Image (tube, rainbow, N blue to C red):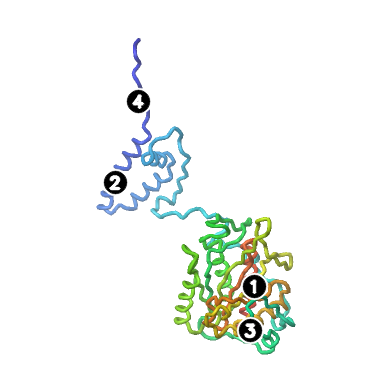
Amino acid sequence: MKKRPVRGTRNPIALPAFLCILLAVLLLGLHCLGGEPAFEALLTRLATSERFVAGALSLELGPSGQSPVVHAPAAAASGLALPPEPEAPHTADEPVSESAFAAPALPAGSFDRKAETVEVSGTTGLSFDVQEMLRDPLELRKTDGPQVLIVHTHGSEAYTNDQTYQYTSEERYRTTDTRFNVVQVGDRLTEVLEENGIQTIHCRTMFDSPAYNGSYGRSLEEIERQLEAHPSIQIVIDLHRDDISLENGGKMSLDWQSDGQEYARMMFVIGSDASGLRHDNWEQNLNWAVNLQAKLDAAYPGLMRAVNLRKQRFNQHLRPGSMIIECGASGNTLTQALRSIALFGNFLAAELNA
């Protein structure tokens, strides 16, 4: 039986391999002759050719039975490394409409009123008089230089996904992507304060990554550095989000509504010396929080949870205006948290500007 000659199959690697060698020679020659623009134009055409890019991939990975689907953006020819596609429809360069974070309209003088009393929770065993604090408030006012320092001891704390902000958890309700965790909330607070003339330093360092243990020690070192560099700082805010589990395994959402908008409820957490660590300022910290809360309760009833006094010091011994703010919980969305922190930022600025 007469054998038929076997025809050679088309090798998808041959053309890209040949062109790669040719391009290397051309690049050397064009560089010597000052012809980089011509070379860039040629590279642009090749980078937008799906056939060439697919062949180049075959050169690296070997041919396969199926032709890969290749998307070859023209920007690749510029030599710039393209960032990964964002996991959410909005990025820092494409902010959500500011109206989403607008505070409810208030009549003039709303921040001048106080609630008759403020609830303080906790089991520290310490004695304090809330009514006396309300009669003799610690008042901090705007001065020259940076006024507020914002840090995030647990910066990876994140929220429940919604249509606007969606991310992939690196741990349960945690991510180091600052577009979706409490660092984003700190960005918004900084923006609002600065818009109102309050100089603010926002430390975006992730103190709980890669190790959660020791995060308070690391944030303390940063706070001390910032206070030494900027003695004008009076208020240190450690911005967190809470985490409350439900019996069914879900996460609680701490909701507050106003004018049809949903907000995340907030809480001031104040440290003390009950753990044995020296903290001479804890009563001043508590006074500051109680009086802020009294005005917030009068202006936005239900927004704030009870002030929480704790045994731990939480790095609050360095300034009388120090506090932890829990902005919502893991069951809330980032959208809700951003609305709430914008509201609080306008309130705090009005207090400092009074």
Distance between the alpha carbons at the discs numbered 1 and 2:
62 Å
Q: Report which quarter residue 55 is drawn in.
A: top left
Q: Earlier in the sequence, mark 1 or mark 4?
A: 4
Which of the two residues, 259 or 307, is positioned nearer the viewer here?
307
* Image mark for residue 8: 4
Q: Position of residue 99 (x, y in %)?
A: 65, 66
Q: Is residue 292 above or below residue 103?
A: below
- Of the residues shown, which amino acid type is indicated by label 1? Met
Q: Circle 2 sits in a helix, a strand or a loop, which is it?
A: helix
Q: Which residue is mark 1?
A: 267
Mark 1 and 2 residues: CB-CB less than 8 Å, in contact?
no
- Of the residues shown, which amino acid type is indicated by label 2? Ala
Please indicate whether residue 131 sits to the left or right of residue 325 in the image. right
Distance between the alpha carbons at the discs numbered 1 and 3:
15 Å
- Closer to the camera: disc 1 or disc 2? 1
Q: Report which quarter residue 125 is drawn in.
A: bottom right
